[in-house]
Image (spheres, grey):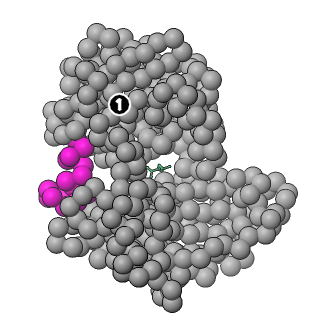
Amino acid sequence: MTLGFPFEQTTTPLSDEERAAILADPGFGRYFTDHMASAGWTPAAGWHNSRVGPLQPFSLHPSAAVLHYAQEIFEGLKAYRHADDSVWLFRPELNARRFARSATRLALPELPEEAFVQSVEELVKADEAWVPAYGGEQSLYLRPFMFASEPFLGVRPAAHVTYSVVASPAGPYFSSGVTGVTLWVSNTYTRAAVGGMGAAKTGGNYAGGLVAQLEAQEHGCDQVLYLDGAEHRWLEESGTMNLCLITSDGELITPGLGTILEGVTRGSVLQLVTEHGLTPVERRVSIDELRAGCRDGSITEVFAVGTAAVITPIVGFKGDGYEAVVGDRQPGKITLAVREHILDLQYGRVPDSRGWLRRVG
Ligand code: COI
């Protein structure tokens, strides 16, 4: 089913000079393009009022349910400019599917996958000039989201829901992205439990992670590494990224699904690593196994994967009373090769034999 996202052009776009100044150093999540996609939903009308129009603030009643009960979901994906100036999305249908699963978990209405992809495509077309030039590691980060906009303080699924997509030119998520980051293994905080919302991409999971991120920073680490909620033993994810370990006997191990986010980059890496001579394995990994493996050299590389962070080498981690170094504290060779591989695919430098790219402009 397609909704159609007719385009209404803004009358107040940023000038070419203003846009160029932003694109010269976009950072992450700081600047937004001239337009946004949006649609509304009610039980009676279904999805309606879908369009791409000028970027503008929402007008929300102070009792809007999202502000009180956090009934909200979101996605993250990127548009990449290739050397011939064309613009492409990477596996947007996977984001659309995950968005639908997140919606179900948060008792929000499902947006048809085709409508999700169309809204993203129409916004990228409208703001194509904002897709950074080919040549660096910049892209246009796209943020689809859906929230309970009904003014109502009772606790039940909202009967008025808003969907929107905004776009933000983006450089690397971590300024130290390729040199490697360190993780704090929190014993205080967990991210999810069986039956909880861990697999959904919902704001509450990120809000709950902020204090854990502060704890990580207090211990001199860049990000938190969560253990499972039941035994405080099994690696989960880092809050904004999935985790991968490489072993000396050629396995790429990543924690299995259930309470973690099913990352698009995670899934893509699991398929690509066979071309790097690795066997992909999804299984539980304990913190003891990680510590022992880093000590005895049977775990040679660790990295984190995510849309925003792409592939980020993990060079060390710390927990209560211990500190561990991965390899020689430098980004691993295979990590960097897999990173190049996925970037080469996204930027069109190698053939897209799996059909993962979708042309937008
Ligand atoms: C992404 O990688 O797209 C994410 O959702 C991480 C984000 C919270 C910065």
Q: Relative to 98, does residue 152 appear above or below in the rendering?
A: below
Q: Secondary structure at mark 1?
A: strand
Give coordinates of residue 221: x percent, y percent: 46, 29
Residue designated by label 1 = 314
**Vertical arrangement, residue 18 with respect to residue 11, above or below:** above
Residue 74's image quarter?
A: bottom right
Magenta range? 338-356
Location of the C terminus (image quadrant): bottom left
Which residue is nearer to you in this view: 202 or 208?
Answer: 208
Find out whether residue 346 is within the magenta segment: yes
Other-residue count near label 1 (Cα within 10 Å), few / some / many at <14 / 14–19 / ≥20: many
Q: Residue at x 36, y 78 (%)?
A: 17
Does residue 159 appear in the picture of this structure? no
Q: Give amino acid for label 1.
A: Ile
**At x 22% / y 65%, what residue is drawn?**
134
Near-viewer residue (80 or 51): 80
Instruction: Answer with left or right where residue 168 lies relative to residue 72.
Output: left
